[in-house]
Amino acid sequence: MSGHSKWSTIKRKKGANDAKRGQLFAKLVKAIEIAARNGGTDPANNASLYQAIQKAKSNSVPNENIERALKRVDGNLETGEIFELSYEGYAPHGVALLISCLTDNKNRTSSDVKATLTKHGGSMGTPGSVNYLFERKAVFQFDKYNDELIDLALNSDCLDILESNQSVTFEFPPSDFKNMNEKFNNNSFVPSNAEIAQIPNVGVVIDMEKFKSVSKLISALEDLDDVQDVYANFDIEEKELEALLSE
C-alpha cells in the first residue's frame, strides 16, 4: 500500500482537532474556487472542479460550504491571481516528496516550504529530481469492502488494487475519475477518500521510528496555508501501521 494511501488512512483514523479540520476545509474550498474560476462553475463540464468537489466531500466539507464557494465565483468576487506550484524535495531517510501548493505569493510559499523542510531534517530538490518517482492516478479508498466491491473494480479495468487489514485502495487512470466515482456511488459503495493523487512508483521502506520523523515533516508542511497536498514515497509494514492506528 503506497505511502500516500497509508498517510491518508492514518490521518482519518487518528482524527484531527477543530483547528486543523478548519484549516483543511479552507484549503479544499480554496481549491474549489480556483477550479471554478479557471473552468466554470458547472462540475459536469469542468473536470478539475468535479475532482475538487469530490475531494472536499470525501473530507466531510459541508455542502453549504461548497455551494457558497461556487456562488462567490459566480458573483465574480475578485480574489487576486492564484498560482499553482509544485515543489520537489526530500524528507529524512531518503523519502521523496512532491509538495502541491496554491498561492498568491510565490516568494512567500517557496521560503516557507524551504524553511519547513530544513527545520525538520529535509531538503529542497531540483526540478525533476523527484517527479519521475510518482504517477498521477485516480484513487478510491474504502474502509469497508467485500468481494462485490472488488469485482466491480476488476470489471472496470482498475490499474491496481491495494488491500490491507484497514482498507482497500483502487487505482485508475486520471481520466476515469468521474466515471468510477459515479459507478461506485451508484452501487452503494461510498469511498472514504476519492481524489486524483500523485502515487509513488517505488516506495522507500521505513520502520516506525523513521516514520515518526517523516510524518512530523509532512504534518508541518501540511500546516502551511499555501500547501494543498504532500505526496511521499515511503512504505511501512502493515503490522507497524496497525500498531500506530491502535495507539
Image: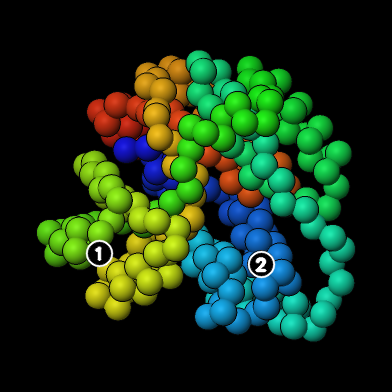
Residue at disc 2, secondary structure = helix
Label 2 sits on what residue type?
Ala
The quarter in which the C terminus is drawn is top left
Q: Is residue 123 above or below residue 59?
A: above
Q: Is residue 244 left or right of residue 146?
A: right
C-alpha distance separating marks 2 and 1: 27 Å
Q: Nearer the viewer, residue 192 or 81?
A: 81
The quarter in which the N terminus is drawn is top left
Residue at disc 1, secondary structure = loop
Q: Is residue 213 left or right of residue 103?
A: left
**Nearest-to-viewer mark from 2 and 1:** 1
Q: Is residue 24 visible?
A: yes
User: Where does the image place residue 18, in percent across and percent down from the top left?
Assistant: 60, 53
Which residue was labeled with disc 2?
Answer: 35
Label 1 sits on what residue type?
Ser
Q: Is residue 53 visible?
A: no
Which residue was labeled with disc 1?
Answer: 156
Dot 1 alpha-carbon crowd within 10 angstroms: few under 14, some 14 to 19, many 20 or more: some
User: Where does the image place residue 194, in percent across and percent down from the top left?
Assistant: 43, 59
Q: Residue at x 83, y 43 (%)?
A: 106
Q: Residue at x 48, y 38 (%)?
A: 134
Q: Is residue 230 above or below residue 75?
A: above
